[in-house]
Amino acid sequence: MARPKAKELTARELEVMHIFWDRNQVDPAIELTVSDVRDAMQKAGRDLAYTTVATLVRILMEKEFLNQTNEERPFLYRAVRSFDEVSGNMLGEMIQKVFGGSREKLLMRLMEERKLTSKELKAIEDILRENS
């Protein structure tokens, strides 16, 4: 029996998605080629072969994170799922799997990890004030 396709993103797939998300902040209608993605990865210090990046883009299309927007070469791709959607889903899954669904345990672990900066502390206070 064939193994079902994983819906989670690998570290490399996430790298590719971050390129789309970062570019979307500048231009929400951005469409990128595999070469564009490879060039951006190379500038970030990740020198992958074109075929490797093309495979990652194909997998992301199969997982429905990217969509091909044209029929002629060079093919153009656009992010289908936003950073907020994906990060929210991934965080929710992690909280469920690691902390048994307890956001309190997650927050406690974050606080134990390292001392918060004054900027981080202020941001948390602002969030708490907004939610009370």
Image (tube, rainbow, N blue to C red):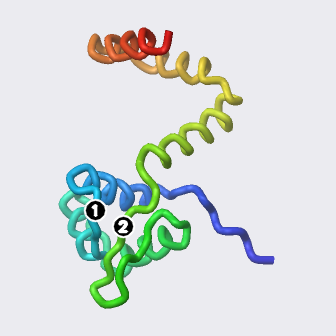
Task: Report the side of 102 relative to 46 (left or right).
Answer: right
Task: Report the side of 21 relative to 83 (left or right).
Answer: left
| Quadrant in the picture for the N terminus | bottom right
**Label 2 sits on residue:** 78
Q: Residue 46 occupies which quadrant of the picture?
A: bottom left
Task: Give the x, y percent position of residue 5.
Answer: 65, 68
Residue plotted at (42% across, 14% down): 130
Checking the image for residue 29, the label placed there is 1
Task: Give the x, y percent position of residue 90.
Answer: 55, 44
Residue positioned most to the right:
1
Task: Report the side of 34 relative to 132 (left or right).
Answer: left
The amino acid beneath tag 1 is: Ala
Task: Give the x, y percent position of residue 37.
Answer: 28, 68
Q: Count how many numbered circles sit on residues in the image.
A: 2
Viewer-nearest of discs 1 and 2: 1
Evaluate if marks 1 and 2 touch, with contact meaning CB atoms under 8 Å apart: yes
Residue plotted at (45% across, 12% down): 128
Front residue of 49/119: it is 119
The amino acid beneath tag 2 is: Arg
Please say if 90 is above or below 112: below
